[in-house]
RNA sequence: GCGGGUGUGGCGGAAUCGGCAGACGCGCUGGAUUUAGGUUCCAGUGGGGCAACCCGUACAGGUUCAAGUCCUGUCACCCGCACCA
């Protein structure tokens, strides 16, 4: 607190006062507005820089200290880039559809829009208090009808498109239709029946086209989460439980809207090489897509028309296939039951179906039942039994495998459990075959020949044998090369209320029809009761809005040429998942008010350019889900000519998690932070008992009472200190513990800055009469370093060098005349510029007191000559005598890179070293 | 189990290219200023030793004139995936 002697001290009250004043001034002057091409103030000569934060889900709990971490980083970079002459787009908005608001509505009956709007207002207030340079005129939320209108529009675009394998890109489905008409192609109208296009009924044609749409209605085994009352995408499930809430998930077949993301698997994979993203994230996406090359092999099944098709990555081990396994859900199981298999089979498949994924995860013990069917080995002609077991998944490959127990651990375990034959067919160097375990990996084929079929693999390397088998299979029509992905199509329907409605209706026969683009948005109807409808088949809450659901084609906005306006129709009652709005928001920020398109093409070309967003900052928890989905939508838009870059985000950066300290008793139970005393010697005690507790690092959580509220911190130190503290904690990408005690350090730094320039007694400027040469050199070096550090997002070291500079320039107490120390007016002006991106309010205040205006605040790098360390260029001494450094030896920099040779040997050099001279700073 | 990452003082961390380990901050110690506390300023602060010096970047080896940094192995923690054929 400022006392009588120092009324002009930089304390929390004063910091808050100038912060609010400047925030208001920036807001009123429109300093944060960013013009678009064609707008007033737009300067086409300036390069653009688009920096984006992952927009938040505005929860009722308000801002968390984790939010401002990334936002401060991007704000510093934005302010720096503006000073460097860039036109910077740095927007903010709200990812506002989602489960928490809906679940709150279920318990309280308050409409999600009410709670969400309130939460948004609170988030905006909190963010504005940090002085972030967001262009608030571009703000929007995904729940705004003006926004979700275009989310629905993009969905219709996918609905009206197909993936043309010839060009590996999305094309309008009308092109496919005209091609079918022109070529009068034969299409499959029912299993095994081919009909020429011209002879097909309208229904048949429609069904055929529907099977190609990128957004399509598919019956799939879905992940139903009873607790959440909705289905979930594969990506939203971790260890058989919902990512959100950790509730159990069961599998059931359901007709749902899907996205054909698998069509883009290869491009999503290949283009990862073109972006500047963290390796960890690219690896995770690569693994999620899970491309594997192998063969599809068709086995003849005794007494069946249809062959059994399997997928294997090791076709070379075909001679080691001693049995087959099909998933319990495989159609052939049903055939086996029909053909009179034992009751055991029926029992097993029924049990496997009901077994939740959680249970499946828990026990990996192999179970299974023989189906009684036999397949014929294509090379040897041997009869091999077909089993069913739940270790084979219906969702991957063909849901069937040829089991090669000798060279696959899972098959080996199963063969041991059911005493099935095991035949070694690969010899692996360094891993001798013992028959005790499976040997996996590549090697040389053995026991792999059959004179009858002419397939000879013995002696071949694995890669060679694979090719030979595939060629042999293809020649006989018994199989082919195949690429398989782990990635599945994206389940896009949710049985929720608080999401974007699908712009689609159904007639009484269940045919679907799109809502015309000019009838968008399809608005979410209000509802009194948000509870999910209890039912065996999942029923979305929207079904309760009966007047909305039951309507006519005309009222719903279906094109009259598709359906007569009086036709009774029902609306789709599923809604889109939370990811929908975040898939394209970065595009809307380019022209948030555009009414004629989802994005204004000129604005899109300017801000997105050919590489997309220049820097995207957000948590690594979105490494797969959001970032994969957004890339998919972007590629779809790219194919259809709506965006100009192949990838949405050129550079990606994940800020680390801000954790907190927690305290543990000897029995590992946790003690709330506010019940612990620091004894100051690195040990901690529990206040109530006096017992020793151990400090650990944990996520902030209510139960540990270690959650830090940004509002409280700002009230105590000001926003500039908060910003500086979070940036000074450590590397941006690292996870680091919040330590309230450390904030004082950066607060004191800002006080020193203030005291350096301002007399605390009367508020007047304190300026040095003449520049000190050492301080001047350090200032030049600091400006250079801070610029470099900002570019590489190393804010912690940038701040450290600012502190060093201020420490060097600080006047000692005993100095009588303040003009003998500190910085000159000109030096102070340069210093304020480098400080400004980090502590914008304090800097602006000093800048104004120096009589300058913000517009003139450009970044000026120091003169190179002034950055040199000192007049005598001392350098690192490579000289060692008996393995020891000899200090203080002068040594030119260049030869360090040069090769060492005898004449330059350290001993020779050290003879010339002048030991004992001081090292220059 | 597989893949990726991280291990540096009492604490957060620095060392960008293989070149004086511990910048900067917290905490702690001492001093000056102050009636006092606080504030501010100055100095010290990896461990051992009176010292010169010795030891020190998870552990064990290796490469190199030189290793926190590169290589091999081990351990611990974190993240992702997990019966994906």
Image (cartoon, rainbow, N blue to C red):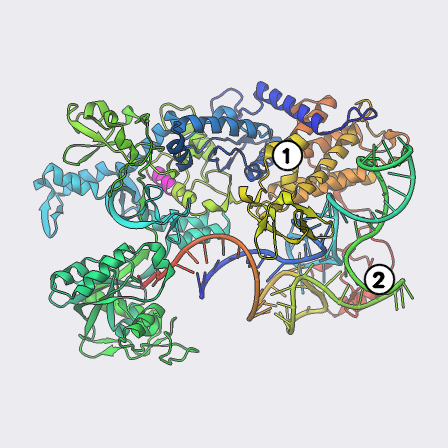
- Label number found at residue A881: none
As drawn, A306 above or below A868: below
Q: Is residue A84 visible?
A: no
Tell me whether the residue at label 2 lies in contact with that at label 1, contact meaning CB atoms closer than 8 angstroms.
no
- Outermost residue on the front side: it is A689
Q: Residue at x 17, y 32 (%)?
A: A507
- Left or right side of A300 for A592: right
Tell me which segment is drawn in magenta: A632-639
Whether labels 2 and 1 belong to a single chain: the reply is yes
Rendered location of residue A243, percent (x, y) = 41, 47
Q: Residue sitting at 63 percent across and 40 percent down?
A: A727
* Distance CA(mark 2)–CA(mark 1): 54 Å
**Residue A352 placement (x, y as % from top left):** 27, 58
Task: Label 2, secondary structure: give it.
Answer: loop
Q: Which structural element holds mark 1?
A: helix
Displayed quadrant of residue A824: top right
Crowd around label 1: few <14 · some 14–19 · many ≥20 (10 Å): some
How many marks the image carries: the answer is 2
**Majority secondary structure of the magenta segment?**
helix
Residue A397 shows up from this direction: yes
Frontmost residue, A596 versus A116: A116
Q: Is residue A298 above or below residue A657?
A: below
Image quadrant containing the N terminus of chain A: top right
Mark 1, chain letter? A
- Pointer 1 residue: A713
Give percent across and percent down for residue A116.
44, 29
Nearer-N-terminus badge (2/1): 1
Residue A638 in the magenta stretch? The answer is yes
In magenta stretch: residue A57: no
Residue hosting label 2: A913
Q: Nearer the viewer, mark 2 or mark 1?
A: 1
Q: Is residue A812 left or right of residue A135?
A: right
């Amino acid at each position: 607190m400022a006392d009588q002697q120092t009324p002009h001290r930089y304390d929390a009250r004063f910091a808050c006062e100038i912060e609010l004043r400047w925030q208001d001034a920036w807001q009123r002057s429109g300093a944060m507005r960013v013009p678009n091409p064609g707008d007033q103030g737009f300067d086409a000569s300036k390069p653009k820089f688009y920096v984006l934060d992952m927009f938040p889900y505005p929860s009722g709990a308000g801002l968390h200290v984790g939010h401002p971490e990334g936002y401060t980083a991007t704000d510093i970079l934005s302010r720096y880039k503006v000073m460097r002459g860039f036109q910077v787009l740095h927007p903010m908005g709200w990812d506002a559809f989602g489960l928490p608001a809906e679940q709150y509505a279920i318990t309280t009956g308050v409409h999600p829009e009410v709670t969400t709007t309130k939460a948004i207002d609170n988030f905006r207030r909190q963010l504005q208090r940090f002085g972030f340079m967001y262009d608030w005129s571009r703000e929007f939320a995904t729940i705004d009808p003006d926004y979700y209108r275009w989310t629905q529009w993009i969905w219709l675009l996918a609905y009206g498109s197909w993936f043309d394998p010839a060009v590996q890109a999305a094309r309008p489905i009308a092109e496919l239709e005209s091609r079918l008409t022109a070529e009068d192609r034969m299409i499959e109208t029912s299993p095994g029946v081919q009909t020429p296009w011209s002879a097909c009924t309208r229904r048949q044609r429609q069904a055929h086209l529907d099977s190609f749409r990128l957004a399509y209605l598919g019956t799939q085994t879905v992940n139903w989460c009873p607790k959440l009352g909705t289905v979930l995408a594969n990506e939203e499930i971790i260890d058989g439980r919902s990512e959100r809430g950790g509730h159990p998930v069961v599998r059931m077949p359901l007709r749902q809207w899907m996205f054909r993301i698998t069509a883009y698997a290869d491009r999503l994979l290949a283009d990862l090489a073109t972006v500047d993203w963290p390796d960890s994230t690219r690896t995770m996406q690569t693994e999620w897509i899970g491309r594997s090359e192998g063969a599809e092999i068709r086995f003849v099944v005794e007494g069946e028309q249809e062959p059994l098709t399997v997928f294997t990555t090791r076709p070379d081990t075909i001679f080691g296939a001693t049995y087959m396994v099909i998933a319990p859900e495989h159609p052939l199981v049903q055939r086996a039951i029909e053909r009179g298999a034992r009751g055991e089979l029926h029992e097993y498949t029924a049990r496997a179906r009901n077994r939740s994924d959680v249970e499946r995860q828990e026990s990996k013990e192999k179970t299974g039942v023989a189906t009684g069917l036999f397949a014929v080995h294509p090379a040897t002609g041997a009869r091999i039994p077909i089993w069913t077991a739940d270790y084979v998944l219906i969702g991957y490959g063909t849901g069937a495998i040829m089991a090669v127990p000798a060279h696959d651990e899972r098959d080996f375990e199963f063969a041991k459990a059911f005493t099935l034959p095991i035949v070694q067919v690969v010899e692996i160097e360094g891993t001798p075959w013992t028959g005790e375990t499976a040997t996996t990996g590549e090697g040389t084929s053995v026991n792999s020949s059959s004179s009858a079929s002419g397939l000879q693999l013995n002696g071949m390397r694995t890669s060679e044998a694979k090719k030979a088998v595939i060629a042999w299979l293809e020649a006989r029509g018994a199989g082919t090369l195949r690429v398989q992905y782990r990635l599945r199509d994206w389940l896009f329907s949710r049985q929720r209320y608080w999401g974007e409605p699908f712009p689609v209706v159904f007639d009484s026969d269940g045919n679907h029809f799109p809502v015309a683009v000019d009838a968008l948005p399809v608005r979410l109807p209000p509802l009194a009761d948000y509870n999910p409808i209890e039912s065996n088949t999942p029923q979305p809450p929207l079904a309760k809005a009966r007047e909305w659901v039951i309507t006519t084609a005309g009222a719903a906005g279906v094109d009259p040429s598709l359906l007569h306006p009086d036709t009774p129709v029902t609306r789709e009652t599923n809604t889109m998942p939370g990811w929908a709005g975040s898939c394209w928001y970065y595009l809307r920020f380019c022209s948030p008010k555009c009414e004629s398109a989802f994005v204004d093409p000129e604005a899109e070309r300017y801000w997105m350019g050919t590489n997309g967003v220049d820097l995207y900052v957000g948590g690594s928890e979105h490494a797969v889900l959001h970032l994969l989905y957004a890339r998919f939508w972007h590629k779809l838009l790219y194919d259809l000519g709506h965006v100009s870059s192949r990838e949405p985000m050129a550079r990606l950066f994940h800020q680390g998690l801000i954790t907190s300290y927690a305290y543990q008793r000897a029995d590992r139970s946790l003690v709330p932070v506010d019940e612990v005393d620091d004894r100051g010697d690195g040990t901690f005690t529990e206040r109530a008992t006096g017992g020793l507790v151990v400090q650990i690092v944990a996520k902030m959580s209510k139960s540990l009472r270690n959650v830090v509220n940004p509002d409280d911190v700002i009230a105590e130190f000001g926003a500039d200190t908060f910003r500086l503290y979070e940036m000074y904690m450590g590397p941006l990408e690292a996870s680091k513990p919040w330590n309230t005690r450390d904030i004082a350090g950066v607060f004191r730094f800002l006080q020193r800055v203030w005291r350096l320039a301002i007399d605390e007694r009367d508020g007047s400027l304190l300026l040095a009469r003449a520049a000190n040469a050492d301080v001047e050199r350090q200032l030049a070096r600091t400006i250079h370093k801070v610029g470099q550090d900002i570019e590489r997002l190393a804010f912690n070291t940038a701040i450290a060098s600012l502190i060093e500079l201020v420490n060097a320039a600080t006047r000692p107490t005993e100095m009588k005349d303040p003009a003998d120390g500190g910085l000159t007016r000109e030096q102070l002006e340069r210093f304020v510029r480098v400080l400004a991106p980090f502590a914008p309010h304090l800097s602006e205040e000093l800048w104004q007191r120096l009589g300058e205006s913000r517009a003139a605040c450009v970044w000026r790098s120091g003169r190179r000559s002034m950055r040199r360390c000192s007049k005598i260029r001392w350098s690192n001494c490579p000289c060692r005598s008996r393995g020891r450094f000899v200090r203080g030896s002068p040594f030119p920099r260049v030869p360090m890179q040069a090769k060492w040779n005898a004449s330059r040997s350290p001993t020779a050099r050290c003879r010339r070293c002048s030991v004992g001279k001081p090292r220059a700073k």
